[in-house]
Image (tube, coloured by chain):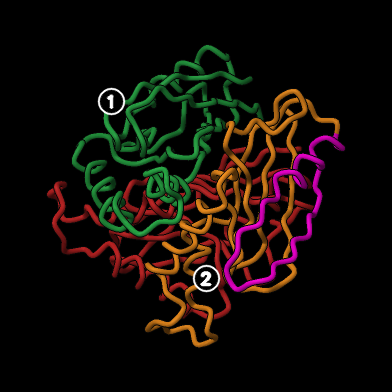
Chain colours: A red, B orange, C green
Amino acid sequence: MLKTISVRTSRRMETVDITELIQEEVSRSGIDEGICICYVPHTTAGIIINEGADPAVCEDILDKLEQVIPRRGSYKHLEGNADSHIKSAIVGSSVTVIIERGRLLLGTWQKIFFCEFDGPRTRKVYVKLIKG
Amino acid sequence: MLKTISVRTSRRMETVDITELIQEEVSRSGIDEGICICYVPHTTAGIIINEGADPAVCEDILDKLEQVIPRRGSYKHLEGNADSHIKSAIVGSSVTVIIERGRLLLGTWQKIFFCEFDGPRTRKVYVKLIKG
Amino acid sequence: MLKTISVRTSRRMETVDITELIQEEVSRSGIDEGICICYVPHTTAGIIINEGADPAVCEDILDKLEQVIPRRGSYKHLEGNADSHIKSAIVGSSVTVIIERGRLLLGTWQKIFFCEFDGPRTRKVYVKLIKG
């Protein structure tokens, strides 16, 4: 089963907790056991799993990415978002989560975050569910 | 099929070769062909695939992560493990390995390593097997 | 279904667009819907998904990796390719792509790139297709 989630971002760099949107698709599918692939079809965005309880955690992640891969730098790609592409490549385009008893099998503190690196924009995340 | 592996770590940062533990679950399952998702349900740990022959390789990986994302730094998350969360986000929460003829289809030098970034602790790794 | 793709690299660090080679395997398989795992069985190479339209994007990605993880550095692994292992661990060994209507469901600008970090060599990429 394939679904598409829409994510509206409001800053150049931002993380958006999409855990509940993905869980809704899993619930609607009726799949009890399997895997869920969350895939970002963009080259200046990414997706991670990390702590959601303290928003400072995601801010630290974005701050460190910006420190190591700054927006202003000596890049060959001249559209002003070379850093966004590099951040996207490092973070990755997808995460895979296990489905158990109809629920995403996340750890206690884990949430799924869409990572915007060149916003604000309206973005998509594909959610693919495989039974098994 | 879903199994849980337990990993005991003994230092703050450490890699633990869990290849054999995962292969045992694959063997027990009787699955000949498919994929194996190894998933870490923690936000201050991760999982990688890399060389196992020379332990210096994993030490270099941890040293570089510590150099770029040092424990002591200017972070907003105030629990003393902001660096561990960032390392976890960069390294990633899961790896996917192909199963062929009942074996993990790893390269000659590849091993699967649990990455502890905020130990010592007792940790879990979920092993999900999909036939196909 | 499992297939192996061969990739010949010509420099120490290089990205090679393997999107079409992987699409050919998907087409040949006759699978309409499912997922495609592209797996690199090497410890000094990796695989990413990013922009293919402007080659400068991949050059920027490689330049940044070399800047943060330089070839010459203070490493414990003494074979002269410690940096290649670290780059491989950070970038990752596999990508997962959704298959829809017999095609890789990539974003408009996305291509799949094999990442050579210790070439030139002849390398392999495993392509595993799962229906569902």
Q: In the rendered image, which quarter contains the N terminus of chain A?
A: top right
Residue A129 relative to residue B3: left or right:
left
Density class for disc 1 (Cα within 10 Å; few <14, some 14-19, many ≥20) is few
Q: Which residues are magenta?
A: B1-29
Residue C87 relative to residue C53: left or right:
right
SS label for mark 1: loop
Residue C65 to residue C122: above or below: below
**What's under tag 2, amino acid-wise?**
His
What residue do we see at 63% from left, 72% from top? B11
Specify the quadrant of the image occupied by residue B116. Answer: bottom right
Residues at marks 1 and 2, CA–CA distance in whole angstroms: 37 Å
Residue C3 relative to residue C51: left or right:
right
**What's under tag 1, amino acid-wise?**
Ser
Residue B24 in magenta stretch: yes
Q: Nearer the viewer, residue C129 or B108?
A: B108
What chain does badge 1 belong to? C
What residue do we see at 70% from left, 25% from top? B100
SS label for mark 2: helix
What chain does badge 2 belong to? B
